[in-house]
Image: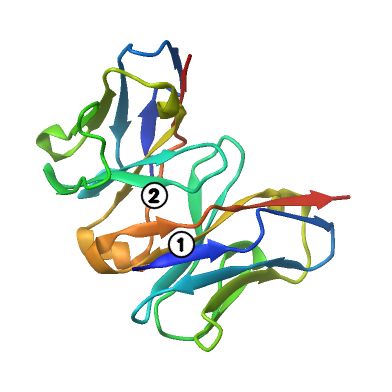
Amino acid sequence: EAGVAQSPRYKIIEKRQSVAFWCNPISGHATLYWYQQILGQGPKLLIQFQNNGVVDDSQLPKDRFSAERLKGVDSTLKIQPAKLEDSAVYLCASSLARDSLFSGELFFGEGSRLTVL
Amino acid sequence: AQSVTQLDSHVSVSEGTPVLLRCNYSSSYSPSLFWYVQHPNKGLQLLLKYTSAATLVKGINGFEAEFKKSETSFHLTKPSAHMSDAAEYFCVSAGGYNKLIFGAGTRLAVHP
């Protein structure tokens, strides 16, 4: 079974530039998550999709971050304009269904590491 | 509000000795708790989970954790460390509003 695919793995940009990350979840997984992991910290949930609808985006900085999940499959996370403090690893995860979150079993991609100079 | 606190940011052990990674939780109701592991440049992987069944939970690679309500703890243990156990370990809480709340992580180093 293929895992969660993310690209690019690494990205270096200057502040005020824009960047986009792509995620392809495990086939059949209805729920998709984007997490931000800053160095030395645990992952923080940015946004959660159920199919192509947003379940939770309370911690997404909406003035600069946006995310979409068209057709309930792939997802993109965009940052525009980037700030220095956005340097982090952006993790995508998926799970079978919303209530499977209580089982705690999310499947994570390897992440996209962003460096903002 | 739910939260987890990992008491050690770094733990260093010798190969073949026991591992103890400590986690305390804060929750207004009986939580679901998990341990995830993150190897360098790899995705996070579920090690084990507690969901109000047995208080002693066994996971992959010989790890286990014990839920102690009286101490609000969910410590991760392994009797004998292996070099391949070197990684970052996260204690995680799940509950209301379908959120996963990660601790800050404990980096485990294993020396020969």
- Residue at image position (22%, 47%) is A58
Quarter of the rendering containing residue B82: bottom right
Q: Disc 2: which chain?
A: A
Is the residue B80 above or below the residue A47 in the image?
A: below
Q: CA distance from mark 1 to mark 2?
A: 14 Å
Q: Which class describes the residues within 10 Å of circle 1: few (<14), some (14-19), or many (20+)?
A: many
Q: Judge depth for marks 1 and 2 and give the one in front.
A: 1
Amino acid identity at mark 2: Phe
- Secondary structure state at the residue bearing disc 2: strand
**Direction right: furthest residue:** B112
Q: Position of residue A99 (x, y in %)?
A: 23, 65
Q: Pick the residue in front: B19 or A87.
A: A87
Q: Disc 1: which chain?
A: B
Q: Which residue is mark 2?
A: A107
Q: Pick the residue in front: A105 or A55.
A: A55
Question: Looking at the image, what colour scheme do you see?
Answer: rainbow
Is the residue B86 above or below the residue B92 in the image?
A: above
Amino acid identity at mark 1: Val
Q: Position of residue A36 (x, y in %)?
A: 40, 39
Q: Pick the residue in front: A65 or B100.
A: A65
- Residue at image position (37%, 33%) is A5
- Secondary structure state at the residue bearing disc 1: strand
Q: Which mark is residue A8?
A: none
A39 lies left or right of A79: right
Q: Which residue is mark 1?
A: B92
- Residue at image position (38%, 21%) is A83
A20 lies left or right of B65: left
The N terminus of chain B - image quarter? bottom left
Q: Position of residue B111 (x, y in %)?
A: 85, 50
